[in-house]
């Protein structure tokens, strides 16, 4: 066989693979869908979640859901694990993973390097809000996918798999880890460098630490029932506040400039501080600018925390490490203090100002 013939056969094979890969996405687009389920599983608004969730090795169905669903409810899972619909003869999944709504491809990790394995992140916008969907543990990334491209709902992102930071997990538990959330810092590398971690950051702003997820299931279900993307800002505004942070600062974080839909009122001419409401899973969902300082002294050392009195919400917030100690203990000893995850989030939102 001549070199030219080999090249021709190879290009035919590649085209064929791309066509098959994209067939389901094209079908979704042809039907004019602007919102779809991320995999080929036939999920509708009333499908019981037990039928599409992939549990961990524990076998407990809820372990594939978002929240404090693992290790006796003490470990947090920031996404939704979706099981495969189809497998090949070797038992590996063949499901196409597709984007659920139109967006821009902002990160492609084609080589497993971290707990997400191979993964793809898309950026989406709605009035006053930028949010992200993340698709992890892929077997391979769609060869047609280009960084920076704007793609419609239903575009193939890759094939479902079981890649992670090691050699992958067992094929019986292959799944799509799906996240939807907001980006905390637009200069995550600077925050990461300040922490002094031994490992380099391989993923820039698309490191999982920098993406704060909310529960993907209500988001997906609402989108399916509406037949279009739901308003994430409305969903976030409707969440209860677990912890409120009062901080004196004249900084207006880039996060809130990019996500003005989370402001409870217009920005005053001069900022003296903020009241920031956090959901129990640590997302800063309600921002109130203050025109007089709420604390004596400025910055994180002088901030004041107010916790919810709802015991269920409080317990969840504590597992998520928003608070360093219980409000009961805090009353006896000293004021409420932020837990590790809240400290990290505030550090990303309010980077040290150059002197
Ligand atoms: Zn997961």
Image (spheres, rainbow, N blue to C red):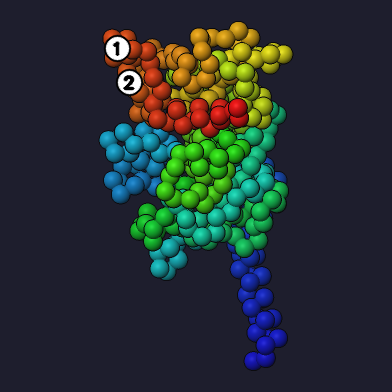
The furthest residue to the front? 355
Q: Residue 325 carries which label?
A: 2
* SS of the residue under disc 2: loop
Disc 2, ligand 1: is the CB inside 8 Å? no
Task: State the residue in front, 45 or 295.
Answer: 295
Residue 317 horizontal/vertical position (percent):
39, 24
Which residue is rendered at x = 60% and y = 7% of the image? 292
Callouts 2 and 1 close, C-beta under 8 Å: yes
Residue tagged by mark 1?
Answer: 333
How many C-alpha atoms fall within 10 Å of the one at disc 2: few (<14), some, or many (≥20)? Answer: some
Q: Earlier in the sequence, mark 2 or mark 1?
A: 2
Task: State the residue in front, 192 or 7.
Answer: 192
How many C-alpha atoms fall within 10 Å of the one at disc 1: few (<14), some, or many (≥20)? Answer: few
Q: Is residue 26 above or below residue 226?
A: below
Q: Which mark is residue 44?
A: none
Residue 260 horizontal/vertical position (percent):
66, 24
Which residue is rendered at x = 44% and y = 42% of the image? 196
Q: Is residue 57 above or below residue 129?
A: below
Residue 319 horizontal/vertical position (percent):
35, 28
Q: Nearer the viewer, mark 2 or mark 1?
A: 1
* SS of the residue under disc 1: loop
């Amino acid at each position: 066989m001549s070199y030219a013939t080999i090249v021709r056969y190879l290009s035919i094979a590649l085209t064929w693979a791309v066509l098959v890969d994209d067939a389901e996405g094209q079908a979704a687009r042809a039907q004019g869908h602007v919102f779809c389920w991320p995999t080929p599983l036939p999920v509708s608004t009333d499908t019981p979640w037990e039928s599409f969730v992939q549990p961990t090795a524990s076998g407990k169905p809820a372990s594939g859901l978002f929240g404090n669903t693992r290790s006796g409810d003490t470990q947090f899972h920031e996404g939704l694990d979706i099981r495969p619909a189809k497998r090949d003869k070797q038992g590996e999944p063949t499901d196409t993973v597709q984007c659920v709504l139109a967006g821009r491809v902002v990160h492609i990790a084609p080589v497993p390097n971290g707990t997400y394995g191979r993964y793809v992140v898309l950026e989406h916008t709605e009035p006053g809000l930028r949010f992200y969907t993340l698709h992890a543990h892929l077997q391979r990334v769609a060869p047609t996918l280009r960084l920076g491209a704007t793609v419609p709902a239903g575009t193939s992102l890759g094939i479902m798999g079981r890649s992670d930071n090691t050699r992958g997990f067992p094929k019986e538990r292959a799944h799509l880890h799906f996240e939807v959330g907001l980006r905390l810092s637009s200069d995550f590398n600077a925050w990461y460098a300040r922490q002094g971690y031994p490992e380099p950051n391989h993923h820039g702003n698309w490191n999982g630490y920098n993406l704060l997820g909310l529960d993907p299931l209500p988001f997906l279900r609402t989108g399916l029932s509406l037949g279009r993307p739901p308003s994430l800002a409305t969903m976030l505004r409707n969440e209860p506040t677990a912890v409120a942070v009062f901080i004196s600062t004249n900084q207006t974080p880039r996060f809130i400039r990019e996500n003005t839909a989370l402001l409870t009122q217009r920005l005053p001419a001069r900022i003296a501080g903020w009241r920031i409401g956090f959901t129990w899973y640590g997302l800063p969902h309600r921002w109130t600018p203050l025109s007089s300082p709420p604390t004596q002294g400025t910055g994180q050392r002088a901030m004041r925390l107010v916790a919810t009195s709802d015991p269920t919400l409080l317990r969840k917030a504590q597992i998520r490490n928003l608070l360093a100690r219980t409000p009961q203990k805090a009353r006896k000893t000293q004021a409420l203090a932020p837990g590790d995850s809240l400290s990290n989030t505030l550090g990303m939102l309010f980077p040290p100002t150059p002197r």
